[in-house]
Image (spheres, helix red, strand yellow):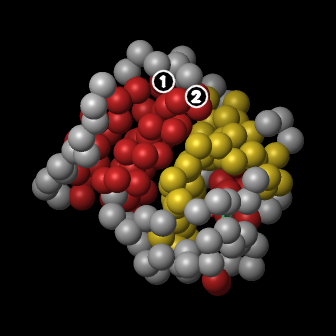
Amino acid sequence: MSFSVPELSGSPAERYAELAGFASALIDGEPDRVANAANLSALVKATVPDLNWVGFYFFDGTELVVGPFQGLPACIRIPLDRGVCGAAARTGRTQRVDDVHAVADHIACDGATNSELVVPLVRDGELIGVFDLDSEKPARFTDDDQRGLEAIAAVYLDSLR
Ligand code: SME
């Protein structure tokens, strides 16, 4: 199998709709959570501009443990009461942070990061983990990015069934 980076076009919402289609096709029929997290991290890093870290943390029943990602090496374990990832996991709500330096609780893995989006991964009420994206650009993530990346997270969750 060879893979080419999809050329996305149109408005941000249209680009994300197209990306969700590529994401579904990429992991179609594969239920392995590590394989799908790895390929989705690679797809998003290759297609969504200005990201320095894209990846997954998995909940091990106690804390978040780093999974497949693209970017610099990252913190391995994050307790649920810490960081932006912990907040997403604890509350079940997407955390969008325009300036991570303004968040006392932020855990700096890559010092170059300025903004962050963390989508909780919850299936049938069960916490699976989080999908985490970092950018060097301040306020990188818009409403369209949030909706689009939540849709990619939903594609991932669907694949686990
Ligand atoms: N910044 C995150 C930690 C994970 S790294 O960004 C990869 C946080 O505050 O939870």
**Which label lies toward us, 1 or 2?**
2
Q: Which residue is mark 1?
A: 159
**Residue at far front of view:** 2
Residue shown at 44% from the left, 40% from the top: 40
Q: Is residue 112 above or below residue 161?
A: below
Q: Quadrant of the N terminus?
A: top left
**Marks 1 and 2 close (CB-CB < 8 Å):** yes
**Quick one: 93 or 42, which is closer to the camera?**
42
Between 53 and 20, the residue placed more toward the observer is 53
Can you tell which quarter of the image residue 39 is in? top left
The residue at label 1 has a CB less than 8 Å from ligand 1: no
Residue 140 horizontal/vertical position (percent): 41, 72
Left of 10 or right of it: where is 59? right
Residue 17 at least partly seen: no
Residue tagged 2: 33
Q: Give, as a three-letter code, the residue at label 1.
A: Ser
- Quadrant assignment, res 108: bottom right
Query: Ligand 1 closer than 8 Å to the CB at disc 2?
Result: no
Label 2 packing within 10 angstroms: few (<14), some (14-19), many (20+): some
Q: Position of residue 64 (x, y in %)?
A: 75, 47
Secondary structure beneath dot 1 equals helix
x and y percent of residue 57 in the render? 66, 46
Q: Earlier in the sequence, mark 1 or mark 2?
A: 2
